[in-house]
Image (cartoon, grey):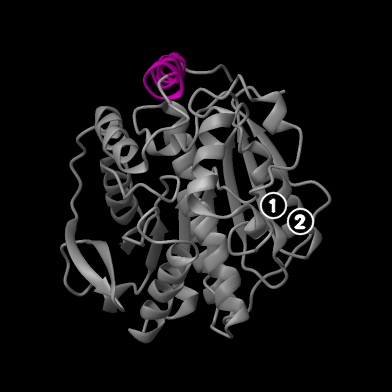
Amino acid sequence: MKRSWQSIIVNGVLRLLVRLRFRANADPIESREQALRSGARLAQKQLTNTVTEQVSMGGVPALKVSLPDPSLKQRTGKVLLYLHGGGFYLPAMSLHTQYVQMLAEKLQCQVFMPDYRLVPEHAFPAAAEDCLASYRYLLEQGYAADDIVLAGDSAGGNLSLVTVMSARDSGLPLPAGAALLSPATDCLFRGPAYRRNRHRDPLFSVTAVDWMLKNYVRKDQYRDPKASPLYGSFAGLPPLQFHVGSTELLLDSSILADRKARRQGVRSTVHVWYKMPHVFPLISFLPEARQATEQIIEFIQQCWAERSASGNQIVLESSSSNTKHLVGVP
């Protein structure tokens, strides 16, 4: 399948407006304001039949998206806990809000998106603590772990993996699965993609990634599984699905995490999309984004169905190769 002309334009816009304008000495607060303005340009108005409100998840502010039907919780009980990206220093943007509204409508479920604490105001591991507290809140509110799926993009993909691992280590029941969009799993950036894609990634430069890492975590903490879940144990985790672009600096963050997960008995799949930008599923007008979102929705529904059928038993499956190349990837 050929790459869409829309993606070519988006890559060019990102390269001009974001990648080439990044300054190594940028102030995080100033960069936050600039990024929010850029994100608003990519957002499109979407009419969804959802209700959006601000709530507190055990002290963590959050956005809750649900359907107008007040009996939704009793009717389905399904919940998506979505952890937004943004380099650990950006709040959820309009792209995130529109994406979770769409997911709530298509999945016929409630979606909670925590407003976890950000750097530089709050140091690592504040964000990870807030995300685990949000998951614990759902359990305390009576939602069954079988009915909860996690999803997250970029930094939120990192936090999704960290949350599931922390829940396991805390003895909490695990969610039915986790969908991960271009997650940052390795602060050390092992693997060849970080070198091979250093000039190919349309959004991030190596300088920009190093800047975000410096603002989030100290170098001596890079191997801490709460900062780099790649160095944690994947044993016993629920099914995972990764989506990542072939030219991303973060490409190997997905490939290596998927490989380790399968090696430790977790059912995991990584979808590598040809020349797609970072967290492209959120850019709704891209044909590839719609295809990826359909796969994410199917995966989430499958996680719920399998957990329900297995009676709270995590299905473990190992495969020697589970990488899927899509949209023209050789």
- The x, y position of residue 152, in whole percent, is 46, 53
The residue nearer to you, when weighing 231 against 62, is: 231
- Position of residue 278 relative to residue 178, above or below, is above
In the image, 235: left or right of 302?
right
Q: Quadrant of the C terminus?
A: top right
Question: Is the residue marked by circle 2 packed among few (<14), some (14-19), or many (20+) residues within 10 Å?
Answer: some
Magenta region = 5-20
State whether residue 302 appears in this view.
Answer: no
- The x, y position of residue 226, in whole percent, is 59, 64
The residue nearer to you, when weighing 165 against 73, is: 165
Question: Is the residue marked by circle 1 packed among few (<14), some (14-19), or many (20+) residues within 10 Å?
Answer: many
| Magenta segment main secondary structure | helix
Assess whether residue 19 is covered by the magenta stretch.
yes
The residue nearer to you, when weighing 236 against 303, is: 236
Q: What's the residue type where badge 1 is placed?
A: Ala
Q: Which image quadrant for residue 282?
A: top left
- The x, y position of residue 31, in whole percent, is 34, 36
Q: Quadrant of the N terminus?
A: top right
Q: What's the residue type where badge 2 is placed?
A: Lys
Across the whole image, how many numbered discs are drawn on residues? Answer: 2
| Dot 1: element | helix
- Position of residue 215 relative to residue 326, above or below, is below
- The x, y position of residue 146, in whole percent, is 49, 76
In the image, 280: left or right of 59?
right
Taking the spot 53% from the left edge, 51% from the top edge, the residue there is: 180
Pointer 1 and pointer 2: residues touching (CB < 8 Å)? yes
- Give the residue at mark 1: 257
